[in-house]
Amino acid sequence: MSNFTRRGLIKTGATVGAGLAMPTFITSPLAAYTNAPTGGSVTLGFNVPQSGPYADEGADELRAYKLAVEHLNGGGDGGMMNTFSSKSLTGNGILGKKVEYVTGDTQTKSDAARASAKSMIEKDNAVMITGGSSSGVAIAVQGLCQEAGVIFMAGLTHSNDTTGKDKKANGFRHFFNGYMSAAALAPVLEARYGKDRNAYHLTADYTWGWTQQESIAAATEAKGWNTVNNVLTPLATTDFSSYVAPVLNSGADILVLNHYGGNMINSLTSAVQFGLRDKIVNGKNFEIVVPLYSRLMARGAGENVKGIFGSTNWHWSLSDEGSKAFVKSFGTKYGFPPSQAAHTTYVQTLLYADACERSGTFNPCGVSEALEGFKFDGMGNGPTEYRAEDHQCFKDVLVVKGKENPTSEFDVLEVVEITPRAQVEYSADHPMFAGGALGKCNPGA
Amino acid sequence: MKTISKADMRTLFFVAIIALFAPLILNPFPTESGWAQFNAGYPDLMQRFAIYGILAIGFNILFGLTGYLSFGHAAFLGVGSYSAVWMFKLLSMNIIPALILSVIVAGLFSLLIGFISLRRSGIYFSILTLAFAQMSFALAYSVLTPLTNGETGLQITLNDPRIFAAENISGNLPVTSLFGLEMRDTWTMQLGAWDFQFNIGYYICAIFLLLAFYISIRIFRSPFGMMLRAIKTNQTRLNFTGINTRPYTLAAFVISGMYAGLAGGLMASMDPLAGAERMQWTASGEIVLMTILGGTGTLLGPVMGAGFIKYFENIFSKINDTVLHGWFSWMPDGLENVIVWILHLFTGKGWHLTLGIMFMMIVIFLPGGLMEGISRIGKWWKHRNAKNNNTSHTSSTPAE
Amino acid sequence: MGILTVQNVNKSFGGLKALHNVNLDIEEGKIHAIIGPNGAGKSTLLNCFVGKLTPDTGTVMFDGHSLLGIKPHQINQLGVSRVFQTPEIFSELTVWENTLIPCFAKRDGAFTLNALSRVSDNKDMAEKAEQMLVDVDLIDKKDMLASSMSRGDKRRLEMAMCLSQKPKLLLLDEPTAGMARADTESTIELLKSIQKKLKITMAIIEHDMSVVFSLAQKISVLAQGTVIVEDVPEKIKGHPKVKEAYLGEAQV
Amino acid sequence: MDAILLQILNGLDKGSAYALIALGLTLIFGTLGVVNFAHGALFMLGAFCAVSLQKLMSVSKITIDPSQLDFLGKPLKVKTPYVVEWFGPKFGNAIIDWNVPLAIIVAIPVMLLVGYVMERGLIKHFYKRPHADQILVTFGLAIVIQELVKANFGANPIPTPAPDQFVGSYNIGALIGLDASYPYWRLIYFAFSAIIISSVFAFLRFTTFGMVVRAGMADRETVGLLGINIDRRFTIMFGIAAAVAGLAGVMYTPINSPNYHMGMDFLVLSFVVVVVGGMGSLPGAVLAGFLLGVLESFASMNEVKGFFEMLYLPSIDQIIIYLVAIIVLLTRPRGLMGKAGVMEE
């Protein structure tokens, strides 16, 4: 038993059976953490949906990752590395090691995502896993990374739970969440649509939907709105007509669609088809709200998004230096502007690399320490902080609406307001985020 | 009394040898070489090979022998996983109680579903099982969230009760173990340019696979197995021979449900998470495909089918453009780009396409599945040898 | 009282009356033939014996048990076996397995979870099956797939399967239908020898009069769903009612 | 009442899609004895006929407008579709706008051809193979078709709106003294499916061709003995089934933006529909399609959900189809109108 290492995946030298003449002995020093890079390179694992409904978002994330790797290794124009407030990245890889990467397919299933992440850790010796386009997957992979002792830099995940009840010491989220969406949207909605409103919620019947609905209802009710009804819709629904039809006579004058991806496109399309937006109820124009927008997905709804409010983590039309630099290098390389998923994954990669540089190690505990409480700027969302208590980034949130007169196929949303960070902040022990424990950082090995 | 015949013993022994040396066999390429991409000898995938092998063996007892095509078998896999994770949450991280409970719960669940569904046969039976499984999936994803943790999947957390476990002071999540042997313990042997990983979890799975395989051989060769095959060919005659077919099919259904429960429990033991997608119809369909692909009704086929599909899913999906460019960088630029462009349709995000084409190829050219391919090669080999022997007259008496 | 007694059985399908007050008494140890023109209700009657159909009214008693409302396998377990018009065998199994299954069914009953012993370890079953195959002269075809046999062989196999259970009553639905003359004769011989050796009661439905008269010890004539005559073969031959029933058919 | 009328309409609309796909599945199964798991993919291909036509019509001439800038700050490339260029903005844009109805004309020959090629090239060789093999090969084909579409069009849904004239809704309730507005396109979709379904039935009922096919469905060998080339007719039937699925797909695009896996979404439900209707029964398939559609719609009403929640059956809308399927199959062994002995072994 002495030959077995207690925690996972260390390489030790070994004698082999007598049949082999002179086996090579390689005894590597006992590593202090999982997958400590040994050669001149370090491997990152990009785990994104490549099949299934979110494959296009996954493809965009992957583009951003490749761009980030290129910049880290000194290629391209450096992108956001030039605008990033921390200057420890020099284009010389990470800690002098060339950055390499492996990719995998999450299929937007927690099982497949974990299998893919495990293969990156076990087979390819990835020292950090990042990516994903749904909260279920993010939470599942975050749990795995915690157990295996590698860092997880979450991609697109919007559920409160990722940094709420399911938060993990090895996991970090740059993306915003349901609470922040609600906090940013509510004042804008109040200003545009007034105080006295009756909202009808259609909510995707799984955890992300529930947490977002809870957040939006709480935030709008605080502004004086009344929540008439909340109807849960099955994930597999493709035709939302039977959920939309009852809205007509419910007395509600606002419809909130707590849907994402294909669900969002279909429910919004149905709602517009049924002429909800042409109605006048209680003497007011009927309005539709989509709290979480994704530009890539919104395109699928075509004309129907025009004038509809929502929130988003980032948008390519922002004019700060960081955003401009990113859009320029991404656009030059690929010919179209990046999505918010691309932005968040690019930034996460840079943040990880920077944390390694500052702490001088790839050890998850060192990286984690460097990220906790880290304040930075120049990454597109204004001054940002990675909060130590729950590993959630706090930054400005964008309120957007579907553009009335788009000039190109990418020009789907327009930024209505940049809600300052102070307005979307919450305390780490907020009841919507309660119930979990961060635990301690796990270096594995 | 000998329990299995010599030929079966040989097959079992063959499987055992393969399982024992899988970490070597599945890692034929040096770690740093470009071909290492095709290595499958890492713990997670090897565990999956074994676990899905168990699942397919169990499914084959139902489908291969009786011909009843269950389209909802993934439900039992899911139920097994959930039971196991609950045991980890409530009792301790030892996998034994978890596996026992998952087999029992899956058995009871399949008894219930089987009892109702087996009132019909043929496609009506298939659709009944499909309906039950889809209901289980839908409910597990939404309303049963307190029990299943819905979309995210059921995970262990630091504040689970775990009444038999010592108090956790490390602040880290505990890991699954078998009386102190941790499932994730891996011993890596470096041999020249090769890295071979020997993982405890894998060997536990392999032992269960052998056990499952052994039991399946016994069932195949038993009077019970013969009755099941008789059900497939002529139920009327069997009824008029005094056999009540319902309990036989139900027993086969429950046995294969328990196999699925064991597979689900093992899956959770290797990686303590149980996701609802495990119960979706696509997952059930995958089990069916594994069995048909490998060779329905054969002993080894389903295991091979399982390995085949899991290999494509895990290996081909990871071959991205950069890897392809790496392979063909020796070519002139233009040609390299053309080749990479063609291949990238089939690898990485296109891995489904390759899988689809392979399905079609195999079913078109090898109607009996992979097993038919193997037996054809075997025949060809024998034929060739026989020819050689005849011409050279140097044949020695073959050893028994 | 015979081994099988049928009293006042009626069965109709929709408006069509297939059986009308049928009474029948099959004596133990005898070969009893049921004949009649097409559509007389022979097959319907047979199906009422084996649980495939349930009569609307009337009783079917076998060896002291009512056969009504119980399943085919239960009837078989009481000691009734049936040979079908087109042989019902396990065509994807070997001849050997085909004969083994009834042996196991006889020994283990309607359901036994005998999943861990090997088939070949059940020596007594193997002997029984082998003996049976010798009896019907199929022993050299024992490892063949049942589906690849000739029709006559299939018939013999089916009969072997039924006989290996040592039934108290064997029902034969046109056992020589579609057979060549030589096959028919050997089948007749087979049935005769079985009857002598094993004293099995048999009920035969048959078209071929030569078969009927060389086998049967008693004959019931069915016409338009009712038994018009029941007697020994010699008396049936010239019976006016029988002539009328058959001629009536011929005139149509 | 208004609410109930609306849900009936919703149900009929959903049912139309189910019924059309199930009808094709049953035709193929009834005539050729083949379980076609690629039928969902045919539905999807139909929808992508509309998408392709849209792409084709928006092939554009690119002019550079230096007065406007794109997202990188370079002069904006202005795209003018050639159709607009040739026919003038008014008529040209109208053609683009009428993409979906035009796509029907394109889809019919395309889908007939797809069906023909599929049957002659692949399905033909699987008539005598076990159903399991048929499932495997058609499932493989479905994956291949799906992946090719994904490689070409991406994974995200692509909006294909109905012509402007059909946007908006019509107060159909007013006809019977109620107030229930229903979107134009959905009404058209329902009417369209009704026409397709009745023409298929009429075709089978009143043409010689249809009569031969129906006879063939009942007893293939006998019809073959009559010297009728039944195989060729069955090939044509396969093409028709493919066209029915394809048309269902084209017309569906304005209701929900098509994506590459929409076929799979419908496939399993369609199989449930076919089986609930009864294997091999065309009227059964249509009836079950509408029945399940309507029941599904009712189950999503708040009142119904609330009622079942009182019975400790929350989220009835998640499981209604499967629950109904189980109940039907347990009470009627061969579905609503199934024949004995079809796929029961």
Image: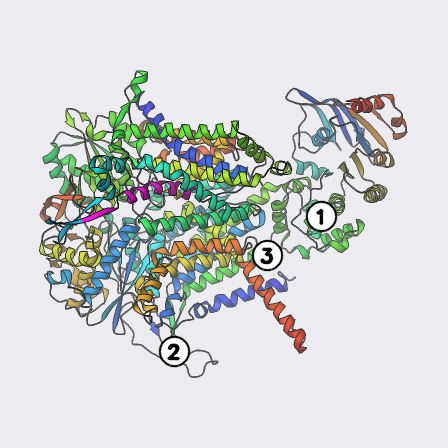
Q: Position of residue D341 (x, y in %)?
A: 59, 36
Residue at the image point whose x is 49% and y is 46% from the top: D135
Q: Position of residue B146 (x, y in %)?
A: 33, 43
On screen, D162 above or below B395? above
Residue designated by label 3? B218
On the same chain: label 3 and label 1?
Answer: no
Kindly give the residue lying farthest to the top in the view shown: D177
Distance from label 3 to label 1 (Cα)?
20 Å
Q: Position of residue B373 (x, y in %)?
A: 54, 60
Q: Secondary structure at mark 2?
A: loop
Three-letter code for the amino acid on which mark 2 is drawn: Gly
Q: Earlier in the sequence, mark 2 or mark 3?
A: 2
The front one of D114 and A442 is: D114
What mark, if any, has residue D205 been given in the picture?
Answer: none
Can residue D239 be seen in this snapshot? yes
Q: Is residue A409 left or right of residue D318?
A: left
Q: Which image quarter holds the N terminus of chain B?
A: bottom right
Residue designated by label 1? C103
For label 2, count other residues whose C-alpha is less than 10 Å away and answer few (under 14), some (14-19) or many (20+): few
Looking at the rendered image, the disc whose residue lies closer to the viewer, 2 or 1, is: 2
Chain to which mark 1 belongs: C
Picture quarter containing residue A244? top left
Distance from label 2 to label 1 (Cα)?
61 Å
The front one of A82 and D43 is: D43
What mark, if any, has residue B192 been given in the picture?
Answer: 2
Residue at the image point whose x is 48% and y is 33% from the top: D276
Three-letter code for the amino acid on which mark 3 is drawn: Arg
Q: Secondary structure at mark 1?
A: helix
Three-letter code for the amino acid on which mark 1 is drawn: Cys
Magenta residues? D33-62
